[in-house]
């Protein structure tokens, strides 16, 4: 049995309903802070952990299962495309089947870029990222589960299509990176859509609607909300509230499939008030006060 | 169009196959590093982002869908329990149905504890966590998707059971926290298993097998590998390789359901070599060298 810390004994002494038996060595394990001799915690998790690999495989396994259910129960299949406000939802009738994926941290892990980022500590720079697009094709790996899922989709006669904000000028190197990762062959303008294509915007709704004009899109995959719809911009708390309510609530795991990314992007940036609601803040009763 | 950085022009000049058109402003957005005026990045992601909420809802939605498929296609249902080596897998025949979940960062978000942790910067301390178990029951929230999933499970006559490493001495306060989060009523020794129960170990296989002796467990949910099996200990790279191969590969999203947690636990800790394979390291061709 572990020796109780003096502060705990004081706390228990002051607590009328304190249990007689001491607490066990408790879960959860210690939070791991950034350490000088290790990559940033988010990279440890995304690129180094079994848990994040399991999350990714789970997303792809759930996608395949959900698409099978969709095809078995709906004629024509239910489209995964959410039409922008004021536009008409595309019909699936008579169209070949497709599933649309973001590329970075959805289909491929940018191990080379993030290693350089972590080692250099310089932060994000669009020109640096452009050089990565041009020279990093053999320094990526498939997201766990992506290769098998893409193969299964093709065997089901469902075409994987990539909709990425990599630049249109990098089309050739982007197809090289996808092929290197084992994800198969993609053709610019047919099964690969880049920033600069269609309407030239970084928002992906225009490209999604162009794809849906030709294809019946039965699933969307991505690591950021913009990979699913452009409608969910705004502050973190508002975005979080939106995705936990209908209609989005029912989309996750059924037609929209999210991959983990605590390293960069729209999943980061919330401040104290957006992250910790005022009524959920706790102060250690044994402490003199919280710093 | 953005002006090209001089370093990029140099890089392109030295590259025989450089494209004529300049790269577009590129994805992904800048990595967000820890900022003094914001919580740690992992907390921003897990507690503040729409993307992590979507991952959690997706896990719970996929769980319900998979359990429906299991019940519709298998008699008796397929058990989610992996028997420890040398033991016999428990049969589902003739038993009532259950789904077993970890508690912390699986069923409830420990917002109060993590807020205090981030503000105090003191790091993990078992005595501090024990005080949290005793006094923090109203400073938690349900993980997005958990409340609806537990309700749906109960409506399907499947009993949610919590298997947590909170201490057995905190049974009363733990049931209070679960009820406060809206997750329903749990009874210690029946539908709530804590550290100290059964074999007294922090490894959960003993408690899982005790539960499976009475129940047909159709799904497991957790944020760490130990919530599914004790067999996957070891170094990060070995654990990651294991979960991406059979038999585990097929479990994720079908009988095992993982929730995101880049804040603490066994998903963190990988070093440079475990996180970034040697053959996936990239150096910026325009840089003098990587620090």
Image (cartoon, coloured by chain):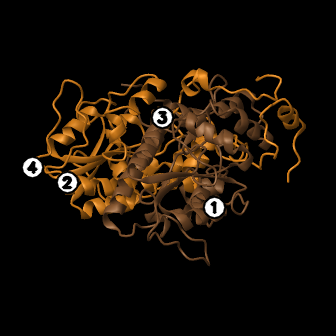
Chain colours: A orange, B brown
Q: Nearer the viewer, residue A223 or B145?
A: B145
Disc 1 versus disc 4: nearer the observer:
1
Does dot 2 land on a helix, a strand or a loop? helix
Are discs 4 and 2 both within one chain? yes
Q: Nearer the viewer, residue B267 or B175?
A: B175
Identify the residue position indicated by label 2 in the image.
Answer: A73
Are discs 3 and 1 both within one chain? no
| C-alpha separation, residue under disc 1 versus residue under disc 4 | 53 Å
| C-alpha separation, residue under disc 2 versus residue under disc 3 | 36 Å
Identify the residue position indicated by label 1 in the image.
Answer: B207
Q: Residue at x 69, y 31 (%)?
A: B118
Identify the residue position indicated by label 4 in the image.
Answer: A94
Q: Which mark is residue A265?
A: 3
The C terminus of chain A, quarter of image: top right
| C-alpha separation, residue under disc 4 versus residue under disc 2 | 16 Å
Disc 1 versus disc 2: nearer the observer:
1
Visible residue check, residue B220? no
Disc 3 versus disc 1: nearer the observer:
1
Does dot 4 land on a helix, a strand or a loop? loop
Does dot 1 land on a helix, a strand or a loop? helix
| C-alpha separation, residue under disc 3 versus residue under disc 4 | 36 Å
A267 lies above or below B185: above
Q: Residues within 10 Å of mark 3 (few under 14, many from 20)?
A: some
Are discs 1 and 2 both within one chain? no
Disc 3 versus disc 4: nearer the observer:
4
The N terminus of chain A, quarter of image: bottom right
Answer left or right for A78 relative to B122.
Answer: left
Chain under numbered label 3: A
Answer left or right for A282 relative to B244.
Answer: right
- The percent coordinates of residue B133 (x first, y second) are 70, 39
């Amino acid at each position: 049995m572990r020796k109780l810390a003096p502060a705990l004994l004081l706390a228990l002494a002051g607590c009328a309903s304190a249990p007689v038996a001491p607490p066990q060595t408790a879960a959860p394990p210690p939070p791991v802070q950034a350490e000088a001799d290790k990559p940033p915690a988010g990279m440890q998790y995304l690129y180094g952990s079994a848990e994040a690999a399991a999350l990714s495989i789970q997303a792809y396994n759930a996608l395949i299962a959900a698409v099978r259910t969709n095809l078995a129960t709906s004629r024509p299949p239910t489209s995964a495309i959410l039409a922008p406000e004021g536009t008409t939802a595309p019909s699936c009738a008579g169209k070949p089947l497709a599933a649309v994926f973001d590329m970075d941290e959805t289909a491929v892990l940018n191990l080379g870029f993030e290693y350089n980022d972590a080692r250099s500590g310089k932060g994000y720079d669009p020109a640096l990222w452009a050089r990565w697009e041009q020279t990093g094709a053999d320094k990526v790996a498939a997201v766990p589960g992506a290769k098998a899922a893409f193969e299964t989709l093709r065997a089901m006669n469902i075409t994987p299509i990539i909709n990425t904000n990599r630049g249109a000028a990098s089309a050739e190197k982007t197809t090289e990176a996808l092929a290197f990762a084992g994800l198969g062959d993609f053709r610019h303008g047919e099964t690969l859509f880049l920033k600069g294509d269609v309407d030239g915007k970084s928002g992906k709704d225009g490209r999604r609607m162009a794809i849906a004009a030709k294809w019946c899109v039965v699933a969307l995959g991505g690591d950021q909300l913009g990979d699913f719809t452009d409608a969910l911009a705004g502050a973190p708390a508002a975005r979080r509230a939106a995705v936990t309510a209908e209609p989005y609530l029912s989309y996750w795991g059924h037609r929209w499939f999210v991959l983990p990314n605590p390293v960069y992007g729209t999943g980061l940036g919330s401040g104290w008030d957006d992250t910790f609601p005022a009524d959920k803040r706790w102060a250690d009763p044994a402490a003199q006060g919280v710093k």
